[in-house]
Structures are given as structure tokens and as C-alpha cells.
Image (cartoon, helix red, strand yellow):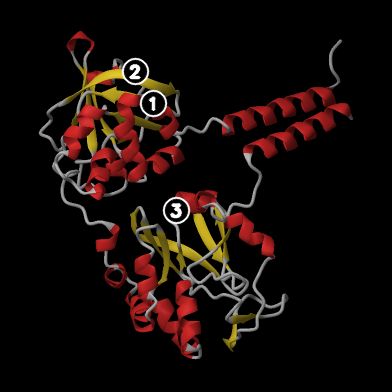
Amino acid sequence: MPHPPALTSTLALSVLFLFLLSSTSQAHNITRILAKHPELSSFNHYLTLTHLATEINRRQTITVLAIDNAAMSSLLSKGLSVYTIKNVLSLHVLVDYFGAKKLHQITHGTTLASSMFQATGAAAGTSGYVNITNLKGGKVGFGAEDNDGKLNSFYVKSVQEMPYNISVLQISQVLTSAEAEAPTAGPSQLNLTAILSKQGCKAFADLLISSGADTTFETNIDGGLTVFCPTDAVINGFLPKYKNLTTSQKVSLLLYHGIPVYQSLQMLKSNNGLVNTLATDKANKFDFTVQNDGEIVSLETEVVTAKITGTLIDEEPLVIYKVNKVLQPTELFKVKTASAPKEVAEGPDDSADAPGSDDSEDQTADSDKNGVAGLDGGRLGMVVLSLCAGVLLM
């Protein structure tokens, strides 16, 4: 007996919900994959130490060229800094999917694959590309493009494949690349205010230095730091209001432009919600809301909404964005009536209430999910199943 049209539609909708739910739970974890293979433990350790594991887990299509402990020992014996090792290992992460079968079906027998080293902009020209060539006898060679075309490493075996999400392949040796092995400055060696001054945020950098807030920003770099810098024109237009603030209020306002965790643009897009800042101190929340509309990311306070207009630097654990407005917290500035547009009231106001409720602090407890206010996979599954069951019983 055929089902009524309404029931058929309901069943189809239910299947779609369950499919979407199952597909979102297919996220990979490179650390867990490699943990099953002791011979790759050193490679696994350094992926975690350099934060590359986090970046690999965030990407939806990726190929990891793993090397065994002996090959890692050869790399470590060169005495490279951990930041240079990160560049070398980034060359071993391809931003495309290559399963074992695909390696032997490459068009024309050879191809250039972009690596994470090239994708982050750390490599000059084509030096971040990896040459993959299908050779005689079933061998597949790998070589860095800036190594004069030499294939110094070869395919060993497939560790794990999840088409077309992640493929982990073992290769015989570390890919040789002069560009990747060049000395790299660590975060502590990066001069934050110098970077800001050279790229259109000198006025903001000068305020950080004169207020002493630059010290707080600098000490947070190693642990992860996201900075939002208003451009020179924006700061210059805001100076009359800034001068009305007390010394401590000026510091709080500047610290409000930093998040004490690394947040790539993709992370900001996916982790919409409340975030704490360097100015957050217990009851003094000094938080704001991250929202995105497609590719546009906005930072919303109860006073003003600013937009990210560019990226100055993105080298985990430090990322700096340009914004088109000064971020103004309600702890320092009055909010006009609901009928009026969001603007800054004249002068500071320490008595203004913080936005949101105390529950917002619970939403930022996990730095990897900073600002996420949503359901986890299990709770979402229960909600979807409950809704589908309710509809079917109607």
C-alpha cells in the first residue's frame, strides 16, 4: 500500500536529517590516527608541538605524508628550531586528497601538489609545492619543487584513508627543501608593534606603547594571540573620545582588541558567539560577539559593530586582523536607546552594565571552541531524532 504524500515527504526529510547528522560526525583526528602506529610517534608528537595537528583536523580535504621515527631523527639532528621544523612538516601536508590508488593514476604520470607550507604564504614562489611522480615498478617518488626536481622520498604504504576527507601515507624520507629549512623567527622574536606600524596600524601601535598595553600583548603571543587593529584613519578619528578616558580605561580599551587564543579566519567564521578578551577580568567581562555573513566577519558590541577588512599576519600562534572601527565595550561607553543606531555616547561610563548573562562565561571555557554557543554532536542527534519521531507519529 503506497504511503500518503505527506508521510513520504516526512520520511525523506527524516532520512536527510540523519544523513546530515552522520556526515558532520565524520571529522578526522590526525593524532588518534597516528597513535595507532608507534613507528610514527615522533612525527605525531611534532605535529602536536607545532600546532599543525589542529590545522590538519580543521581542514576537510587533506593528505599527510608521514615519516617514521628514523627519518624524524635525521631531521631533528640538524638542530632546527621548532618553528623551522613546523615549516618542514608543513611541506608534508598536502591540501588535496591523494589516496594510494590515485598516486598510480596521476595524469601524465606527474603532478605538483600544493602543501600547507605554500598555502600559508610562508613559502616564496613555487617552493611550497611537492612533485609527485609515478615511476617504474610501481614506485611513487616525492620531492620539494625547490629541490631541483629531485625525488628524494618514496611511497611506503597507506596508513589510513577516509575518501575524500583525509589520507595518511607513509613516505621514506623527509622532503628536502632549503626554503622550508631556512631559519624562522619564533613568536617571541616577533615585534608586534613593528608589524602593526609597517602595515597601516601605526597609530594603534603607538597607543599600545604609550599606555604600556603592548607588554600584555607580547607576553600572550607564545600561548596564542589574536589581535584586531583599527587602521590609522580610524584611530585618528577616535582620538578625541580616547583622550577622555582615564589611564586604566585606556589600557582596558586597548586590551579589548586582543583575544588570548589563536583564531584563524576560518575558526572565527565557524565559532560564532561570545569571546573573552585580554581585558576580561572575572565580572568585568569585556567580551564581544563574533558573527559572520558568508565571507564577512563582524565583531559586535552593544555599542558598535566592526568588520574585519584584512589580515596582516597569520602565523600560528599569532594572527593580526585589520578592523574598520574601534571596538567599544559597554563597560566604558554608554549605549543609546534601542530606537537609535548603535553609536558611542559622549565620554566614558564605568557604571554601564556588561552585555549578556553570566552564562556567557561557560561558553568560552574551551579555547578550541571559544565563543561557541551550540549543541554538540550527541545532543544535536537527540534533538533531530526526537523531532523526526514526533513528526512521524503525527
Residue at which label 2 appears: 100
The numbered mark at residue 265 is 3
Is residue 135 found left or right of 298 in the rendered image?
Answer: left
| Secondary structure of the residue carrying numbered label 1 | strand
Distance between the Cα atoms at labels 3 and 2?
Answer: 32 Å
Distance between the Cα atoms at labels 3 and 1?
Answer: 24 Å
Q: Are marks 2 and 1 in contact (CB under 8 Å)?
A: yes
Q: In the current view of this chain or complex, which residue is farthest to the right?
A: 394
Relative image position of residue 380 (x, y in whole percent) = 68, 38
Residue at which label 1 appears: 167
Q: In the current view of this chain or complex, which residue is farthest to the front?
A: 38
Task: Judge whether residue 294 can be spotted in this image.
Answer: no
Q: Quadrant of residue 50?
A: top left
| Secondary structure of the residue carrying numbered label 3 | helix
Is residue 162 found left or right of 273 in the rendered image?
Answer: left
Relative image position of residue 126 (x, y in whole percent) = 20, 41
Q: Residues within 10 Å of mark 2 (few under 14, many from 20)?
A: some
Q: Residue at x 58, y 88 (%)?
A: 346
Q: Earlier in the sequence, mark 3 or mark 1?
A: 1
Q: Residue at x 61, y 85 (%)?
A: 349
At label 1, the amino acid type is Ser
Relative image position of residue 108 (x, y in whole percent) = 23, 19
Q: Are marks 3 and 1 in contact (CB under 8 Å)?
A: no
Relative image position of residue 234 (x, y in whole percent) = 43, 77
Distance between the Cα atoms at labels 2 and 1?
Answer: 8 Å
| Secondary structure of the residue carrying numbered label 2 | helix
